[in-house]
Image (spheres, rainbow, N blue to C red):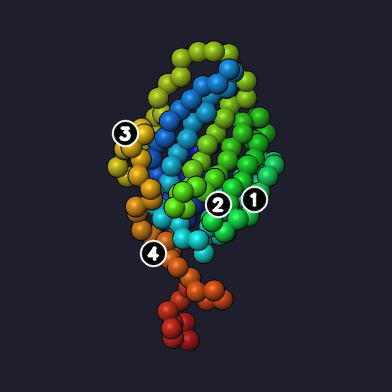
Amino acid sequence: MLDATVGAVVPEIHWVHDKTTSGSCDVSRRRTVMTIISGQRRGAFLGVIQRFWKAHDYDITTVHPSREHPRMYARSPEGFGISLVFGYKGQAFFEVATPCVTKSDVAEPTSVPNGPAYPLGEIPTPNVRSAFWSAEVPVGGTGRGEGEGR
């Protein structure tokens, strides 16, 4: 679910694995986005994820449209919970939680991050610039420079 969700974002974002935890009967996996997503682009980022989740029959359960810390929660048809949350310095975090499962060993993630793999607990704030996602678009602007597209 995380691979597919992150893979749906175009232009591509950089991400790293974050901690995996197990609760009383569930397992949660997390990814931290290392691409800087400007305040002006966060709504578009949520829109990309929301459209992807809806196209895959996820039930969007909550959307909190804040400029600084927007977040969105959904449930897959199989009962997995998935979320996108913006935190400190606009860093985006994805999390997937399983439905209640039988206790067993949890394997390490097999996906390879598309950037440096930071030790858990040492993941910095976003530090990868994107011409699109990091752009500070003037209010009412198109994101194009003066005179472009004319």
> Label 3: which residue?
119
Tally of numbered discs: 4
Lower position in the chain sequence, tag 2 or tag 4 = 2
Report, in whole angstroms, how far the alpha carbon at label 2 lies from the one at label 4.
Answer: 21 Å
Q: How far apart are marks 3 and 4 (CA)?
A: 27 Å
Which residue does the numbered mark 2 point to in the structure image?
Answer: 69
Q: Which mark is residue 73?
A: none
* First-in-chain label (1 vs 2): 1
Residue 67 visible to an observer of this rendering: yes
Circle 4: element type? loop
> Is residue 95 depicted above or below 70 in this figure?
above
Q: Label 4: which residue?
A: 131
Crowdedness near tag 3: few (<14), some (14–19) or many (≥20) residues, C-alpha within 10 Å: few
Label 3 SS: loop
Rendered residue at 43%/46% (across/down): 33
The Cα atoms of the two marked residues, 2 and 3, are separated by 25 Å
Measure the C-alpha gap from mark 4 to mark 1.
Answer: 26 Å
Helix, strand or loop under label 2: loop
Residue indicated by mark 1: 64
Identity of the residue drawn at 43% across and 30% down: 19
Q: Looking at the picture, does residue 102 appear above or below residue 27? A: above
Query: Which is more foreground, mark 4 or mark 1?
Result: 1
